[in-house]
Image (tube, rainbow, N blue to C red):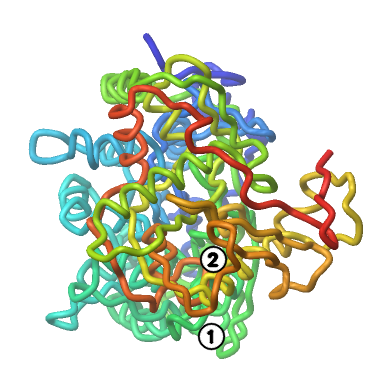
Amino acid sequence: MTGSPLHRRALLAGGAATVLAATGFHSTAHAAPDDRTAGARRFTLTVLGTTDLHGNVFNWDYFADREFDDSAHNDIGLAKLSTLVKAIRRERGAHRTLLVDAGDTIQGTPLAYYYAKVEPIGRRKAHPMATAMNELGYDAAALGNHEFNYGIPLLREFEKQLDFPLLAANAVDSATGRPAFRPYVVKTVWRTGSAPLRVGVLGLTNPGIAIWDKAHVEGRMTFPGVLEQARHWVPRVRAAGADLVVVAAHSGADLSSSLGDLLPFPENCSALVAEEVPGIDAILVGHAHTEIAQRFVTNRDTGRQVLLTEPLFWGKRLSVMEFDLEWTPRRGWQPTASRSRVLDTTTSAEDPVIVRKLRDDHERVVAYVNSRIGTSRAAMSAATARYEDTAVLDLVNRVQGEALKAGLAEALPVLSLASPFNKAAAIPTGEVSVRDVAGLYVYDNTLLGVRLTGAQLKDYLERSAGYFKAVGTAGPHQPDALTNANGTPDYLYDVAAGLDAPLTYDIDLARPVGQRVVGLAYDGAPVAPDQAFAVAVNNYRQSGGGNFPHVATAPVLHNQQLEIRQLIIEWVREHGEIDPAAFSSTDWRLVVDGVPVVVA
């Protein structure tokens, strides 16, 4: 079939032993649950964990129209995860195994976008992620921040389609002050006489939702801090009868935040939760898109070791947590040891059941993203967009600027800000498809217009210029020697452009951060500190994402909830032809003491 999921480097799905042996997995389960020593009963529980699946069912790159691949040759998707999960269940026994997710499920691929916006899910159409996750037999899933990107109604529809609960103890209904979603679930895993083993799963989502998806949640839900809500809810999970408590937290392990001082709660704090909140046995970490095979944090109150693990995003890895427990009449079930590792999905075949169930959904999306919407007179690439002015970002800024100008109520010079989201994005010469254009803008952001002064614009660009590393000569330099200073991701770097007149500036990498933007001019004249501009930004920036100065508190001039990706697609459809010569120019550059930087 066109666009069918493939099985590169995959094994034939020939049983648990074959699949698990290929991953290097060996069971470390101990005595059977009915083994007894001096009145004790022992049991080994396996908890499997996923996170940040981001709409990936198949090992397929919709933007490239081919099987997914990356520099590490990872595979992705729930179909491959399913093979591993089912193999482990067969080996361990379903009564010994739980499956949990830590959030960010329904956003991130054209598949997710299509069934949210083009052919929205409803009573007659299940979300492909719901179908796949039900087939895998999840026991619970925490909400991630990206669950709210398409609005609460679509999230509620997705929730209804699941055979398991969505958990979010710190998503609070603004009207009632009560949890808007189920805070936790207690699962009875094993029954043996009067000693059932109960496992509590507490879900915690990210407080940044209040900022990043303000348009969807303001006045409807609030999102208290992860640590604060863990302190409140963990004792309640224990009181509900949980012998073992696993937290699924959509919050990275180590303290860090892109929220600045916009919220009093940290964005990432799972290790701190483990350290500060007694009663937690393990945390399945999400949100940070990093891999933690096994990490232990000592709880300050109890001195007990809390297990942390985070599988790599998009279904590249599966976390396998194991807990040895012992039951005695006096103490009930108590954990005696725990451990975890991650399994690589690369060596597993895609589950044929999921392929059969979702083949048609996948092919519908492949046909959509490959549909022709126009032509281009010249090829444009985003490969160099992070360190030099490119036509591809000029196009994004042109579309954003024109959409903002059409909706303005006052006459102001229009500027636009855009990020190099995807280095692999490219517009070919000749026919242009939806996927070509969508690759330029891989996030589901919406367009806003804000009013900034010249001084505020300068501050904003200085913050953006911190993306670059300091160098003392004009080079030549390798790109990686210039970019991503202090680990700053590409999406936290913005380039500016004028719509009706050029905005020009240099970024001097010999100068200290905060003093790098020189020669800032609009239409050839220096920008005055009090000069007013209408500036096109995305909702992530306007809501505080990246902690850029002024933009979150600036007067909003335009907010029609229009998705930028769709604006670009419609712009190409309307114009029929992309002519880079009509909108592309070199308006900013990297310099060292005024000498243009050379990139090798």
Q: Are marks 1 and 2 in contact (CB under 8 Å)?
A: no
Residue drawn at the location 63% of the way across and 79% of the way down? 298
Question: What is the spatial separation of the Cα atoms under label 1 and label 2, in whole angstroms?
Answer: 16 Å
> As drawn, which residue projects farthest toward the top?
1
Asked if residue 548 can be seen in this view, the reply is: yes
Label 2 Cα crowd, 10 Å radius (few <14 / some 14-19 / many 20+): many
Q: Is 111 placed above or below 278 here?
A: above
Residue 144 as seen in the image, left or right of residue 379: left
Asked if residue 194 can be seen in this view, the reply is: no
Q: Please state which of residues 34 and 399 is positioned toward the viewer in this rendering.
A: 399
Residue at disc 2, secondary structure:
loop
Residue 525 as seen in the image, left or right of residue 96: right
Q: Pinpoint residue 528: horizontal percent, then vertical percent.
A: 54, 75
Quarter-wise, where is residue 109 in the image?
Answer: top left
Which residue, given by chain and number where applicable, does mark 2 sit on?
Answer: 252
Residue at disc 1, secondary structure:
helix
Q: Is 176 placed above or below 382 here?
A: below
Q: Amino acid at mark 2?
A: Gly
Q: Which mark is residue 137?
A: none
Residue drawn at the location 37% of the way across and 52% of the way down? 445
Q: Amino acid at mark 1?
A: Glu
Which residue, given by chain and number where applicable, does mark 1 sit on?
Answer: 276
Q: Is 283 placed above or below 420 here?
A: below
Q: Quadrant of the N terminus?
A: top left
Q: Pinpoint residue 428: horizontal percent, then vertical percent.
A: 52, 21
N-term-proximal mark, 1 vs 2 = 2
Q: Please state which of residues 99 and 466 is positioned toward the viewer in this rendering.
A: 466
Residue drawn at the location 69% of the way across and 75% of the way down? 514
Q: Pinpoint residue 410: horizontal percent, then vertical percent.
A: 26, 66
Quarter-wise, where is residue 116 in the image?
Answer: top left
Q: Please state which of residues 197 and 502 is positioned toward the viewer in this rendering.
A: 502
